[in-house]
Amino acid sequence: MAKDTLSITDNRTGKNYEIPIENDTIRAADLKQIKVKDDDFGMMSYDPAFGNTAACISRVTFIDGDNGILQYRGYPIEVLAEKSNFLEVSYLLLHGELPTKTEYDQWVHNIIHHTIVHENIKRFMDGFRYDAHPMGMLLGTVGALSTFYPEAKDIFNKEIRDIQVHRLIAKMPTMAAFAYRHSLGMPYVYPDNDLSYAGNFLNMLFKMTELKYKPNPAIERAIDILFILHADHEQNCSASAMRNVGSSLPDPYSATAAAIAALYGPLHGGANEGVLQMLKEIGSVKNIPEYIKKAKSGEFRLMGFGHRVYKSYDPRAKIIKEIAYDVFEVTGKNPLLDIALELEKIALEDEYFVKRKLYPNVDFYSGLIYQSMGIPLDMFTVLFAIGRTPGWLAQWIELLEDPERRIARPRQIYLGEMDRKYVPMSERGKKKKA
Ligand code: SDX
């Protein structure tokens, strides 16, 4: 009968080892017994960027990259995008089950009643430069929120923790919209709790002098679905930051600020902004072949293309592409769409991209929609952060409840110098005597 073990022979010593296999994985710690000399540290695994390393056991989100499958708590993303809404999906991610009507109504009440931020937050945000990038403002403001709720440090008190979860999901759109209004020099718009989560976000972004902002239903639904599609994505860079920082047990605002910082990067959440900059730079369909050539020479990255896990079409990109047409019905077609569609077509036929299994990812079309809604480029990643907040929090809570939780502290392979002699300043820089 086949055994669930890995037999390893260390040819340096001729010793044999049996390493247990569980969930098609071996524990790196089981390699430590492999030594040449008894006082060796023991063998480690080396996996820069953790491309083949499971950092945790999770039950939140499942991705099958080869088959383009994404499920939140076992529900296919396509079904949730069609039948659910963002607050219901947030509940699902955080509780593991879809809510009953009573649970849903209570959840919505909890979120709605935390949308307002402390008045000092406005003054804090006013301190940013007029042209501050909204992601930098969001990063700083979310971190600052930890000083407004010192009790949030009591992270193992479920009641206190739940209130911080409500606050973060509720206040993210408020802070995001305040950052946008700050960049325009416009007065901040307070939340309108008669509106849906997405509708209220649009209200805080775009309300002018009208007494009551009325969101366009098609735009409101598109934003809500985009938030659903961004809500979680297992151990991506920002969720890993949330877990890594979370493992030293700070309050959730500080851990979320770290996740926002990771998302800000152009290889992660910043890619949606990068796609629009790329499409604007390409400028016309006739210039595409030149840019494809640059991408193939490694001179330039096709933003919105490729993924560490998806080696097939990102299922979210498929849904976003469909939503785009619903939005363009209302806003008019984004002129950059034709370049995006032609770029996708050419890339998917080109050997370089086919061989590397590079397909459009979640960021490829989302920016076209946001731009058509009148949302500026530097707000695109901020919208990603709003959507991802329940996912970060679900991953963080799962970490706190993980019986194997310990502070994250990887090892290294040291190849640097050792035991060097300290040379007085007066003797430095002199040629060493032969
Ligand atoms: C997100 O992890 C997640 O789940 C993230 C995310 C989420 O929901 O949280 O899905 C959100 O971050 C989506 C990705 C957004 N980023 C971009 O669109 C930026 C452009 N894409 C790439 O930089 C890249 O594809 C990554 C960062 C997404 C993935 O990087 P990997 O897995 O480290 O892949 P790689 O850089 O090792 O590339 C493998 C090969 C390389 O070629 P070779 O060295 O083998 O010859 O593919 C090439 C790369 O040069 N390549 C690209 C490319 N992406 C990879 N070549 C041109 N254009 C690209 N976009």
Image (cartoon, grey):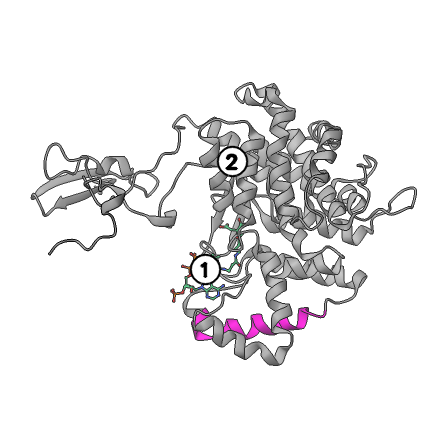
Residue in front for this viewpoint, 106 or 76: 106
Residue in front for this viewpoint, 330 or 143: 143
Residue that appears at 60% across and 74% down:
342
Residue that appears at 58% across and 33% down:
94
Write the start and end of the magenta stretch as one range.
335-353
Pick out the residue farthest to the left.
14
The residue mark sitting in front, 1 or 2, is: 2
Q: Which residue is mark 2?
A: 395
> Is label 2 in a helix, a strand or a loop?
helix
Dot 2, how many residues are within 10 Å of its Cα: few (below 14), some (14-19), or many (20+)? many
What amino acid does circle 1 point to? Lys
Position in image of residue 250 (x %, y %)? 51, 27
Label count reads 2
User: Up-down: is 335 above or below 190?
Assistant: below
- Quadrant of the rendered structure where residue 162 is? top right
> Is label 1 in a helix, a strand or a loop?
loop
Magenta span contains residue 348: yes
Q: Are marks 1 and 2 in contact (CB under 8 Å)?
A: no
Residue in front for this viewpoint, 308 or 206: 206
Q: Which residue is mark 1?
A: 311
